Amino acid sequence: MIARSLPLLITLGWRNLWRHSKRTLVILFAITLGVWFMIISAGMMIGIIEQQLQDTIMNLTGHAQIHRPMFRDDPAIEHSMPPPSDALRKILNSDDVKQWSMRVRQPAVVMSERESRGVTLVGIDPAREKGLSFIGKPVVEGRGLESVDDSGIIIGRRMAEKLQTEVGKRIVIMSQDKDNEVADRGFRIVGLFQAELEATETAYVFTGLKTTQKLLGMGDDISEISLMTASREGLDPLVQRLRQAAPRLEAKSWKELEPLVVTAMALYENFMIFWYLIIFIAMAFGLTNTLLMAVFERTRELGLFQALGMRPRFIVGQVLIESFILLAIGVVIGNLAGVFTTNVIFADGIDLSAFSRGMEQFTMASTMYFTLRAKDILTINLLVIILGLVASLYPAVKAARFVPVEAITRT
Amino acid sequence: MSTVTLKKVCKVFGEGELAVHALRDVDLDIRAGDFVCLSGPSGSGKTTLLNMVGGLDRPTSGEISIADKRVDLMDKGELAEMRLRDIGFVFQAYNLIPVLTALENVEFVMQLQGIAPEQRHRQSREILEEVGLSGLEDRKPAELSGGQQQRVAVARALVSEPALILADEPTANLDSTTAENLMALLRHLNDDHKITFLVSTHDKLVMSHARRLLVLRDGKITDDIQQR
């Protein structure tokens, strides 16, 4: 019987909404505004998380890494590893891996004629870093490294400022070789790189892989293998296969390599639900109030419904349908406005370069991009509609509890 | 078989010294197909009696049965079901649903009954034609005169062919011509459809159309007159 009466309840709900069109439009605006704000908040927060994650992954982490077990605790030269075995290479060259590369990492001191600073010297295969890390991108000044034998060095733009040096000048790298002897060598600066975070620009200097191996007397040994997969979703099974192929090495996904980022992501996600609830509560008061006003204004009519034989649950249903129509319209317009705002108005992100120093404190880049995920939009929509209906239950039950004889005589 | 039976029905509003006895030990039998008019001064208990019979209010004591079903023992859902299936109401103040058209108002009860749209439309149009409102089906209540609105209310009460129609001062807000037409219509429906009517009124015109006239005074039936 409910299904057959549904068209009547929908008709009543829809027409009742427009009896006081201004009031309906005001609450509709509030719902739309709430949904819009939830969507752009989600887009902004997920955008920040995604960007931080992307920066972390591109900051020489990759989707996964392989090292000697002790290397992460003590990245010293004695914890270096041999080049990958055939079994490991087979997996690394499979379709599941988009890009991979070997690197040498070694703590070092860089000296110009004026300053000296502690850095991490990274020996890379420049051709393999494209799409794997930020150093695969073109340099902002000078040239990039050309091969594993390249004897030039690339330093960060900010590091060049700190060392008071520039492209074309020489710097000295001093470190410890395989025999625990001091290994030093002069390098000509061939290029300056730029990273999202200034801290990255002062943390690393890059030269050719073989040049570094030669400087440190490592032979063919390397510090790590970093890899990028085709999709983050298929990462865990791949890491499992890597572990099986190299049981004496340590294969770890970015989640294990960067637990702080994972914790921050979980924190953000939970905070978002809390944030949605705060916005929703403000909205729910308006919704409940509007429906209560509507119910009290229509006391006599609701009494009539009961007198004519409408069961109390139908009256609850009628008020809830009225609320659902309001919520559904608000959600649809809010979604459209939210998607338009994030994907059209701010498609190129928001330029925060004026606050770049402050942003860096929060490890945030100078351009903030919005990222909308279907699951966040779905969560917002379900939350607004389900909690909206829950908030409407009070006026709906109130309407069903009117005593017909009292309601019908109310003026 | 009596359509409506009341045994020792009392209704008291309020408590203690403020208690008002609206009905006092009312006994009544109304046979199927009768046209009964309840008259009496204001406050005599006419509307209270109608509300008790219609299940809109509950008696303080006593029994009320419609077609041998105890109304006073029904729960809210059963009362709603009874009002939906067995009783038609015509109220003094028309009580139409303002957001629905005349046709939709008439269809309202049938929609709640779950009757298919085609049958609903056909029966509603027929009954609106019968009450002289053909051509006004798509008008909202605000676009109809008082008499027309009351006729829509009558059509709504009649359309699902209930066994009993309860009408509370149906002519109170109508001019004499409209009231005469409405009463002629109700009497015609009583004659043709054998629907039982219980009508409360002050109006002598309404009383003149009744087969049986009950006079209420201070919550008691003081006269019970068979007219014709």
Image (cartoon, helix red, strand yellow):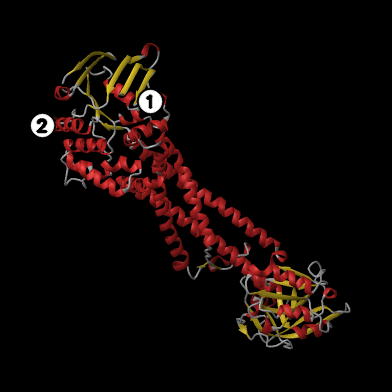
- At label 1, the amino acid type is Val
Answer whether residue A17 is visible to the viewer in this image: yes
| Quadrant (top left/top right/bottom left/bottom right) for the N terminus of chain A | top left
- At label 2, the amino acid type is Thr
Residue under mark 1: which chain is it in? Answer: B
Answer whether residue A299 is visible to the viewer in this image: no
Q: Residue at coordinates 47% horizontally, 56% vertically from top-left?
A: A37
The quarter holding residue A115 reads: bottom right
Q: Find disc 2 in the rendering and name its residue.
A: B177
Q: Residue at coordinates 63% horizontally, 74% vertically from top-left?
A: A230
Mark 2 and mark 1: Cα distance apart in space: 37 Å
Seen in the image, is A386 located left or right of residue B69?
right
Residue A260's disc is none
Residue occupying the far front of the picture: B1
Give the structural element (helix, strand or loop) at label 1.
helix
User: Where is residue A261 drawn, in percent x and y?
Assistant: 66, 62
Q: Nearer the viewer, residue A398 or A56?
A: A398
Residue B71's disc is 1
Q: Nearer the viewer, mark 2 or mark 1?
A: 1
User: Where is residue A218 drawn, in percent x and y?
Assistant: 83, 82
Residue under mark 2: which chain is it in? Answer: B
Seen in the image, is B143 located left or right of residue B23?
left
The quarter holding residue A365 reads: bottom right
